[in-house]
Amino acid sequence: MTKKKFTKDFTLQEPINDEAIEKALSILKSGKIHRYNVDPGQKGEAALLEEEFAKYMGKKYCLACASCGSAMYLALKSAGVKSGDRVLCNAYTLAPVPGAIENTGAAIELVDIIDDYTIDLDDLAKKAAASDTKWFMLSHMRGHITNMDRVMEICSTHGLVLIEDCAHTMGATWDKKKSGGFGTAACFSTQTYKHMNSGEGGLLVTDDADLIARAIIFSGSYMLYERHTSRPGMAVFEDLKTRVPNYSCRMDNLRAAILRPQLAILDAQCKRWNKRYRVLEQGLKKIEGITCPKRDPRENYVGSSIQFSLLDQNEETIRNFLTTCMDQGVELKWFGNKEPVGFTSAYSSWKYFGNLPDLVNTKRILATMCDMRIPLTFTESDCNLILEILKDVAKATLE
Ligand SMILES: *Cc1c(COP(=O)(O)O)cnc(C)c1O
């Protein structure tokens, strides 16, 4: 019997649409790529994107940044995180998140996770109560959203300031409220593998006038903050302008021009992702040896990637499963690798923080967790072929 083979590329996103390309061309032809390089009274593409994304999110203010990592750093700094502070953060997240925390000079207080890959809210409540911790960076890693009602309860009981990392939840909701609408600030990524693609880019949203004014000045506004249109009155800036340094992490008009047409179709794209996700999830649930996490019905996620666990399998078996899948063209990532590779990360590799706690559950859960991208270039029948391969490989390799 010849082995089935999948031949499409797991990192291939859809092309940038024609409308976005036309806009990008007009920006290139104008030569006015820097966000502040606009005619008097004219709104640049970056400013327009900020207005439109704030509106989409139902938030007062938005700042476009160079990346989600820089947006998170600016959000933490602008909220008031100081060197030596402690920031709570779920231990299952991606490297730019601890990186943003480290960049503020704060220490990280890692919080365990539970079997559905979301943060352990009991551990969060315990750590929030026990320490003098005031800050909480919640990363909705790979789009898994925890019980936000309980998160908000814990935050209000313990006076925690919540910053949301929504790199994988742009377009998602918890109980009909947009992910990113819960925290004092929320950060989104427009890096190629997220839900809108400008190569690199980040968006910060908030309702807090002081926070956004700081973030705008931090981002490198060269005292041109008047040209931002998603901002509070100029008086808020007066007081801050010589007290907040310039960290130069702006977005340019070219990226913003590419993103605006994508924002207009974001919700439709999310539906397309979920169609593919549902096909994969249904199929995966029928494969012996593969376990999908339970998802709360209030969680309306965006299935741009899918995760599953190979419960009770040892490292050697999992490695064999992964390489056999790869041989047949199905590229999976594995969170159990001791060495940090590609876009996966285990918290044990963030040694720059010094001593990190032994989180038994996080380690156990990541040890068997696999991860697969679902680019929109895959059709539903591609998803079915992937499932057939996973079924064959699971049968041949899992114990
Ligand atoms: C991609 C990602 C980020 C950071 O995004 P960049 O724009 O690359 O800085 C943050 N958090 C998570 C969970 C991510 O996947």
Image (cartoon, rainbow, N blue to C red):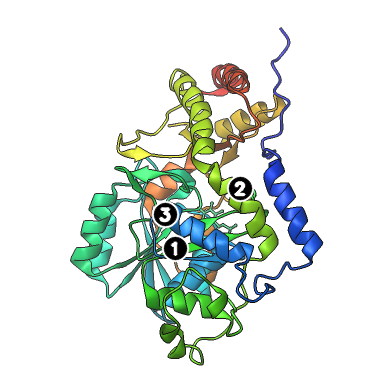
Q: Which residue position is annotated with label 3?
A: 57
- Which amino acid, mark 1? Val
Q: Residue at x 35, y 51 (%)?
A: 119
Disc 2 is placed on an element classified as helix
Q: CA distance from mark 2 to mark 1?
A: 19 Å
Identify the residue at horizontal 59%, vertical 62% (top origin): 67
Task: Give whichever of 366, 243 is nearer the camera.
Answer: 243
Is label 3 in a helix, a strand or a loop? Answer: helix
**Circles 3, 1 touching at the beta carbon (< 8 Å):** yes
Q: Amino acid at mark 3?
A: Met
The circle on residue 205 is 1
Of callouts 2 and 1, which one flags the residue occurring earlier in the amino acid sequence?
1
Of discs 2 and 1, which sits in the foreground?
A: 2
Rendered location of residue 370, percent (x, y): 53, 37
Which residue is outermost to the left?
A: 157
Q: Earlier in the sequence, mark 3 or mark 1?
A: 3
Q: Is residue 196 visible?
A: no
User: Earlier along the polypeptide chain: callout 3 or callout 2?
Assistant: 3
Q: Nearer the viewer, residue 48 or 319?
A: 48
Q: Position of residue 228 (x, y in %)?
A: 54, 72
